[in-house]
């Protein structure tokens, strides 16, 4: 085990990010936003994660920016010895666990504590998921792991209340840090012609879009059903579904069954999301549950009016009637009604988009998010070095 003396001598604190997820999504985008915004000269940063093809957007970015990458040595009880050896070998001063769901990284957290990592912090992206599905053994391990983190970040007051109600975490350990994006990354115009040409869309007809992993959580099938209803009122309406995932084939079959093949485009995973957002008239999120979705923040940064489900942290971002419209989850008819309302009143929709961009500037900038977390890092490292 590294001595306290070693940690004090370290000129640059060693900051290690760890995730167990195997797919690119909002939780992984959060990590990229955070590392990009961090003052890299002040920290020796490394990333530990599964080396899977489905995480390619994160892995390729990390290699491009010269971020040291380590494969995750394991995530099950039998991997504890290897994980402890890993931490003792690399001797991080601070480890930040990125929990794409509340049960993630539990054995990695225990190993970090056993190895004597001085400062341990976690971001819980989905504390809204109840632990009822876990076995009693699972809940016991979870309880131990949560006791081993010094701070736990959540993205909204709603998720702070859910975390306290559902998980064994002390209130003084919980810190709310809203997600943030960089406004300057998001143009608000100038891309419509090239996007329409690329996807064979009518530049003069409405474009409604969504961005996200095509997974059960996102309930994209509700948007497809809403699209059929919207087309009955606005026959020229077109839909862009940006993202990839395990539900793609089923969604393509549903589009076919609804007679929407001519008006719906699946783009697959894209690196140019800001360009695609700037071409949309309305952005839609049909999720069943969320933390604080980056896709909504990005759409607002691009000055797009948002139609979203009223779940978890979403109402803390989208002000109903001001920056967008909120509807119930699993209600395609409400989605369709809200989309149609914005298409029928384009000036009101544009005003909502303008207000959304201003709201992101004031409350959800990447600078605010990174500064809050970096201050926490510094305080934690200083406290452990005392």
Image (tube, rainbow, N blue to C red):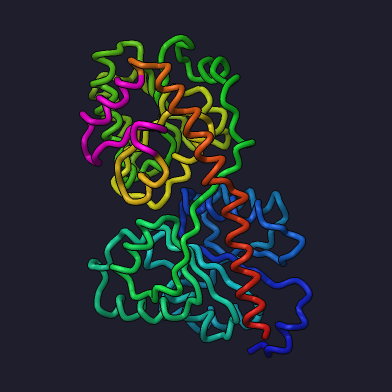
Frontmost residue, 92 versus 185: 185
Relative height, residue 31 to residue 274 (above, below): below
- Is 80 in the magenta? no
Residue at coordinates 52% horizontally, 55% vertically from top-left? 52
Relative height, residue 16 to residue 187 (above, below): below
Task: Report the number of numbered marks.
Answer: 0
Image quarter (top left, top right, bottom left or bottom right) of the C terminus? bottom right
Frontmost residue, 316 versus 130: 316
- Is 326 in the magenta? yes
Residue 303 pos. (x, y %): 51, 29
The answer to whether residue 66 is visible is yes
Residue 223 pos. (x, y %): 30, 31
Please indicate whether residue 57 sits to the left or right of residue 334 in the image.
Answer: right
Residue 234 pos. (x, y %): 30, 13
Frontmost residue, 351 versus 293: 351
Relative height, residue 214 to residue 73 (above, below): above
The answer to whether residue 90 is visible is no
Residue at coordinates 63% horizontally, 80% vertically from top-left? 383
Residue 227 pos. (x, y %): 29, 24
Relative height, residue 188 to residue 101 (above, below): above
Residue at coordinates 26% horizontally, 34% vertically from top-left? 222
Please indicate whether residue 160 sits to the left or right of residue 122 in the image.
Answer: left
Residue at coordinates 32% horizontally, 59% vertically from top-left? 128
Q: Which span is picked out in magenta?
A: 319-342
Frontmost residue, 297 versus 286: 297
Image quarter (top left, top right, bottom left or bottom right) of the N terminus? bottom right
The image quarter in which residue 92 lies: bottom right
């Amino acid at each position: 085990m590294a001595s306290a003396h070693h940690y004090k001598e370290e000129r640059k604190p060693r900051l290690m990010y760890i995730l167990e997820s195997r797919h690119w999504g909002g939780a992984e985008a959060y990590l990229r936003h955070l590392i990009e915004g961090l003052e890299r000269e002040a920290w020796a940063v490394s990333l530990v994660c599964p080396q899977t093809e489905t995480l390619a957007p994160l892995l390729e970015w990390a290699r491009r920016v010269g971020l040291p990458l380590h494969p995750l040595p394991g995530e099950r009880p039998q991997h504890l010895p290897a994980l402890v050896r890993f931490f003792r070998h690399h001797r991080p001063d601070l480890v930040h666990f990125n929990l794409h769901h509340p049960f993630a990284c539990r054995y990695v957290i225990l190993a970090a504590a056993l190895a004597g990592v001085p400062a341990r912090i976690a971001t819980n992206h989905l504390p809204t998921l109840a632990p009822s599905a876990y076995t009693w053994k699972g809940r016991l391990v979870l309880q131990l792991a949560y006791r081993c983190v010094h701070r736990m970040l959540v993205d909204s007051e709603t998720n702070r209340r859910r975390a306290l109600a559902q998980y064994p975490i002390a209130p003084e350990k919980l810190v709310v840090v809203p997600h943030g994006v960089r406004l300057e990354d998001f143009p608000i115009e100038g891309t419509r012609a090239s996007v329409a040409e690329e996807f064979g869309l009518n530049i003069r007809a409405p474009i409604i879009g969504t961005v996200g992993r095509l997974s059960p959580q996102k309930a994209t099938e509700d948007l497809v059903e809403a699209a059929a209803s919207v087309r009955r009122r606005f026959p020229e309406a077109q839909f862009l579904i940006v993202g990839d995932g395990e539900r793609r084939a089923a969604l393509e079959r549903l589009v076919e069954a609804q007679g929407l093949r001519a008006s719906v485009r699946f783009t697959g995973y894209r690196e140019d999301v800001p360009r695609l957002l700037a071409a949309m008239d309305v952005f839609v999120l049909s999720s069943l549950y969320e933390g604080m979705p980056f896709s909504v923040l990005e759409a607002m940064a691009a000055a797009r009016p948002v139609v979203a489900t009223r779940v978890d942290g979403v109402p803390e971002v989208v002000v109903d009637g001001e920056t967008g419209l909120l509807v119930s989850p699993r209600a395609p008819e409400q989605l369709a009604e809200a989309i149609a309302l914005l298409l029928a009143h384009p000036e009101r929709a544009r005003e909502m988009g303008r207000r959304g961009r201003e709201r992101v500037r004031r409350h959800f900038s990447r600078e605010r998010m990174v500064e809050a977390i970096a201050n926490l890092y510094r305080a934690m490292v200083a406290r452990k070095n005392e």
